[in-house]
Amino acid sequence: MAEPSLYEGRLDGTGMRVAIAASRFNHLVVDRLLEGCLDGLRRHGVADADISIARAPGAFELPAVAARLASSGRFDAVVALGAVIRGATGHYDLVAGQAAAGVARAALDSGLPVVFGVLTTETIDQALERAGTKAGNKGYEAAVDAIELVDLYRRLPAGP
Ligand code: INI
């Protein structure tokens, strides 16, 4: 009996070129995500010379910036980092929803991994917990996800 085919990405980022789109809004939180993301990339073999960082004003702008980076042909993956905090905005749902949908669309349109490293929380404390304190660092996780996906895409059968 033949075994099922299993495709899984490995966590070796050697030689991978990664772009990070990071928003400036709530930079106290997002700068911690950026640190975590850089740490995650470096620890998995991505060279600093292969990392580019673009700063967007807010999470609402991340999809457009990520889409440009993804379509540039210069990167193997894009990581979008931001923090949308309900306490800080009356249009939380709009900003968070557009950021999520837009990042997903950038991934589908470009065919590249575009990872959603955007925190969506009720309070600044919850955001800080996920940016390098009690609950890990979503930027680090996003970096590891990007490396895994680049390798997975290389292994998956190519489309027509
Ligand atoms: N942008 C964020 O990244 N996080 C937020 O919590 C936020 N709030 O609170 O409004 C936010 N707003 C700005 C938005 O992303 C755009 O930059 C702005 O609307 C201009 O298009």
Image (cartoon, rainbow, N blue to C red):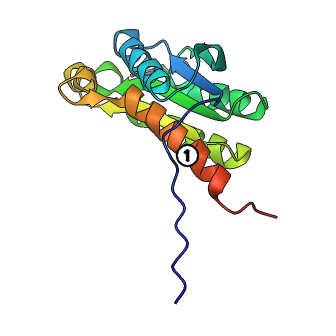
Give the residue displayed 63% in from the left and 44% down from the top. Answer: 107
> The C terminus lies in which quarter of the figure?
bottom right
> Taking 7 as reference, is 76 left or right?
right
- Disc 1 crowd, CA 10 A, few/some/many (<14, 14-19, 20+): many
Residue 73 horizontal/vertical position (percent): 79, 32
Q: Is residue 111 above or below residue 58?
A: below
Q: Residue furthest top?
A: 28
User: Looking at this view, is 109 or 98 the one in front?
Assistant: 109
Residue 90 at least partly seen: no
Give the residue displayed 64% in from the left and 59% down from the top. Answer: 156
Give the residue displayed 59% in from the left and 30% down from the top. Answer: 14
> Taking 93 as reference, is 136 left or right?
left
Residue 115 horizontal/vertical position (percent): 52, 38
Q: How many marks?
A: 1
SS of the residue under disc 1: helix
User: Looking at this view, is 16 or 27 the one in front?
Assistant: 16
- Amino acid carrying label 1: it is Leu
Residue position marked by numbered label 1 in the rendering = 149
